[in-house]
Amino acid sequence: MTLHKEGRKILFFSLIIFVGVFFLFEYALDTPTWVNNAVLVALIVLYLVILQFFRSPKFIINKDEKHVLAPADGKVVVIEDTEEQEYFKGKRKQISIFMSPVNVHVNRSPISGVVKFCKYHAGKYLVAWHPKSSTENERTTIVVETANGVEVLFRQIAGAMARRIKWYVNEGDMVEQGGEFGFIKFGSRVDIYLPLDSEVKVNIGDKTKGGRTVIAELKS
C-alpha cells in the first residue's frame, strides 16, 4: 500500500495544522490535562482518516479486451439503459459506481484504447446519488475507443463533499486497461456508458474494486 500523489500536499499541511493545534492546547491555553489528551486523540484519529483517503494499493491487473473493469472502488448504484446526450447522443447501457469516503479514490481505465474525447465541466455539487448529478455536477467525460472500434464513455462526477476532480489523460493518449486515469478527492461517483449489447456482470448493490472487478463484457 502506498500513498497517492494527490494526498501529499494535503497530508503535509494537515500535519502542520494539527501539530500547531496540539501545541496551542498543550502550552498556550490553560486547559486541563484530560482536555489536552482528548484533543490529541481526536487529532490523531482525524489525521488517520485523511490518510486513508489517499491510499493507493498495488496489484496485478488481468487484462482482457472483452472485459470492462470497474473504474473505481465502490458500490454499484445504477444499471439501466439510458440516453447519453453529451457524446453518443443516443441510447447506451449505464453502470454507475458510488465511491464513499472510505473507498480508494483512484480511478482506473475500464478498457485499453485511444482517448477519443476528453472534456471537463464545471458545475454544481449535488449529492452523488441525485438524478441530475450526472449532467449538472462538476465532472469530466472521457471516451476511449478499443482496438476493435468499440467506444466506452466514463464520467467522473463530483458530489457534495468531493470537489476536487483530477484527470491525467488527453485526447489522443493511449490508455491501458486498469491504468490510472484520474482521482476524485474524498469520493463521489463514476458513470460508465457501454454499447446496448454489452453483458452486465454485476448487480445493484455489488461492491467493486477498481481495476479488478469485471463489471461487463463487450460483445462487439
Image (cartoon, grey):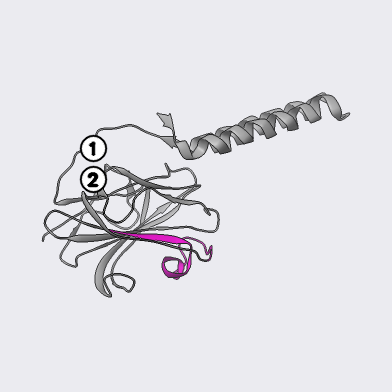
Q: Can residue 38 be seen in this view?
A: no
Decide: is 19 above or below 9.
above
Residue extending furthest toward the front: 172
Q: Does the magenta stretch include residue 77?
A: no
Whether the residues at callouts 1 and 2 have beta carbons within 8 Å, the answer is: yes
Residue 219, x across and y down, in percent: 11, 59
In percent of the image, x 19 and y 38: which residue is there?
A: 62
Amino acid under label 1? Ile
Residue 119, x across and y down, in percent: 38, 62
Decide: is 21 above or below 194.
above
Q: In which quarter of the image is the N terminus?
A: top left
Label 2: few (<14), some (14–19) or many (≥20) C-alpha neighbours in 10 Å: many
Question: Residue under circle 1?
Answer: 61
Question: Residue under circle 2?
Answer: 177
Amino acid under label 2? Gln
Q: Considering depth in this image, is 82 or 153 the residue closer to the camera?
A: 153
Q: Residue 28 carries which label?
A: none
In percent of the image, x 29 and y 32: which residue is there?
A: 59
Magenta region, residue range = 124-143
Q: Is residue 88 visible?
A: yes
54 sits to left or right of 68:
right
Q: Quadrant of the C terminus?
A: bottom left
Residue 120, x across and y down, in percent: 42, 61
